Image (spheres, rainbow, N blue to C red):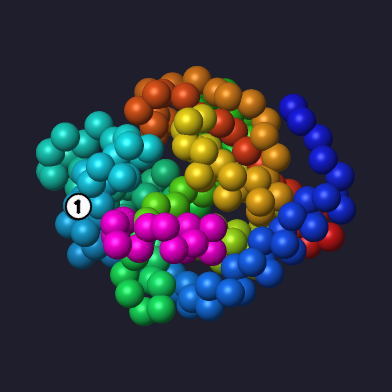
Amino acid sequence: MTTRSKATGTLAALALISALAATAADITFRPFEESDLPQLYKWVRTPHVAQWWWTDSETYEKFVEDFHPDMHAKNFQTPFMVYVDGKLTGYAQYYQADKMCEECRTAYHNPGAGTIGLDIIIGEADQLGKGYGCLMVQTFVEKIFSETDATRIIADPDPANDAAIRCYQKMGFKQVNIIDAPPPCVKTPSHKMLLLELTQDNWHS
């Protein structure tokens, strides 16, 4: 595991916040509903999303079974639709990492209570390349720390997803290591994930 001082992590976060201020975009989150399933299904099948966020839901019926709000609740996931300046743009979810299945907890080095995982996608292709991804992450991290008992947030992008990794690192996330994702946890085409972490102390110090 690599280490970094709290001061360094804080400076990185502050620098990112300053840079994002120029974007002047309003990021809002609405709880995910059953009626959002067709839109999310469309997004996860678009090339720019499927390249990094793989799902084995080959049919819409299987997708509905896997991503229905009832399944989110069963898996201790809290999903949202994300808006940028009032425009529906993407999807985000956070989950209680310590309540994942046993295989997943083992792969993630047995995260303890207070560890929250997050996933974020920009679904609309015309919203790419505008800096919204990092802004969405920053706003979502603030939301998680303010609305949950999280003391640690983890992210798990594909190791080849350089843009996402740079964004998380600018936020103060530190690299833990590359993990092999067991079948229930596979979210990337490579079946590999780069485990990153951010502590509440680093975020607020």
Q: Name the residue rendered at 44%, 63% in the picture.
A: 130
Is disc 1 placed on a helix, strand or loop?
Answer: helix
| Picture quadrant where residue 205 is located | bottom right
Q: Name the residue rendered at 35%, 63% in the picture.
A: 127
Task: Please give the residue where the numbered disc 1 appears in the rendered image.
Answer: 42
Percent from the top left, x then y, of residue 141?
60, 59
Magenta span contains residue 67: no
Quick one: 62 or 28, which is closer to the camera? Answer: 28
Percent from the top left, x then y, of residue 88?
31, 70
| Residue 79 shows in the view | no
The amino acid on which the numbered mark 1 sits, given as a three-letter code, is: Lys
42 in relation to 194, above or below: below
Q: Is residue 105 left or right of residue 66?
A: right
Span shown in magenta: 123-135
Magenta span contains residue 134: yes
Q: Name the residue rendered at 21%, 59% in the picture.
A: 39
Q: Quadrant of the N terminus?
A: top right
| Picture quadrant where residue 87 is located | bottom left
